[in-house]
Image: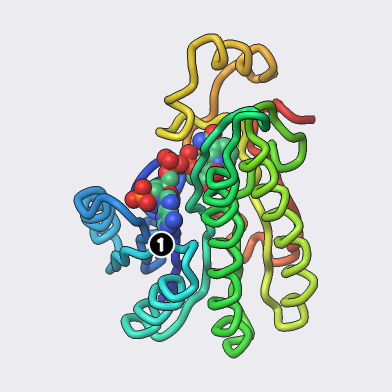
Amino acid sequence: MKVAIVTGATRGIGRQTAIDLAENGYNVVINYTHSDDAALEVKAICDKYNEALIVKADVSKMEEASMLVDKTLEKYGRIDLLINNAGITKDNLILRMTGADFESVINVNLVGTFNMCKTVSKVLFKQRSGSIINIASVVGETGNLGQANYAASKGGVIALTKTLAKELGLRGIRVNAIAPGYIDTDMTKVLSDDVKNGILNNIPLKRFGSPKDVSNLAVFLASDNASYITGQIINVCGGMVI
Ligand code: NAP
């Protein structure tokens, strides 16, 4: 049975992706840092299909990322898929953005993705198989007002994805990124109605995305149907960025 680690799997896109992967035959490792109850709820859903594991770990810390991988190997003995989904925002215009807020967003979104990619790559390299999907963002391609930290982190994730696709391809390991636009989750709920309406005006499909819109692509990219796709950044944004 295939094994997938999904970071940040207790809410939003990560939660839906974990559930969809379980439904598609994966044993899923559900990672998070805060709510044990939320993790147990996702595990209960995944357990209907296969046996899931929950691991509390802050991916921005290398020792905790390594512990997450060790616990996965202890339980299942292999890893077939890593989805780097954990992410945070701390928005502000550059003149008001503190160094601490810049650093913490880079640490979770970019350093966390690096920590997981580095640790899991060792396992995939030995297996000579597996795939990595990084959740980036369209703002990593376009930039965005008030998101210097977040856009820089996601631009970094895009560059990391392309580089790892080149480094790991010779062992048959694929690395891709999904760049969502505006997806309805806790992360975007905090935006004002004015900001939301402004965004909606620029979306040709005239609706916000759902976690399912993103997880559908993740399941496809993880599958053998995507076996000749690597190093690609695929937007799921209703046409917001064309
Ligand atoms: P969300 O609803 O806020 O969920 C984020 C998840 O990440 C939670 O499960 C959270 O759990 C976990 N997390 C946060 N920091 C973590 C850490 N250091 N280590 C491990 N887990 C951590 O976010 P979302 O909207 O689903 O976003 C998921 C991903 O998609 C993010 O990378 C985000 O940047 C990206 N994205 C989202 C949108 C959007 O419109 N929503 C657009 C583009 C890209 P805990 O709080 O328990 O840690």
Q: Compared with residue 67, is residue 18 higher up or lower down, i.e. above or below?
A: above
Q: Would you say residue 216 is visible in this rendering?
A: no
Using the image as rendered, state which of residue 36 and residue 131 is in the foreground.
36
Q: Residues within 10 Å of mark 1 (few under 14, many from 20)?
A: many
What residue appears at the point 54 percent right and 9 percent down from the top-left corner? 194
Q: Which residue is mark 1?
A: 58
Q: Would you say residue 111 is visible in this rendering?
A: yes
Looking at the rendered image, the quarter that the C terminus falls into is: top right
Looking at the rendered image, the quarter that the N terminus falls into is: bottom left
Q: Compared with residue 12, is residue 41 higher up or lower down, i.e. above or below?
A: below
Query: For disc 1, does the CB lie below 8 Å from ligand 1?
Result: yes
Q: How is the rendered protein coloured?
A: rainbow
Q: Amino acid at mark 1?
A: Asp
Left/right of residue 29 with respect to residue 199 in the rendered view: left
Left/right of residue 112 with respect to residue 8 in the rendered view: right
Using the image as rendered, state which of residue 225 and residue 47 is in the foreground.
47
| Residue 52 spot, x, y in % from top left | 30, 66
What residue appears at the point 35 percent right and 61 percent down from the top-left corner? 30
What residue appears at the point 68 percent right and 65 percent down from the top-left corner? 175
What residue appears at the point 71 percent right and 54 percent down from the top-left corner? 156
Left/right of residue 63 with respect to residue 38 in the rendered view: right
Q: Would you identify the image quadrant in which residue 121 lies?
A: bottom right
Q: Compared with residue 208, is residue 126 higher up or lower down, i.e. above or below?
A: below
Badge count: 1
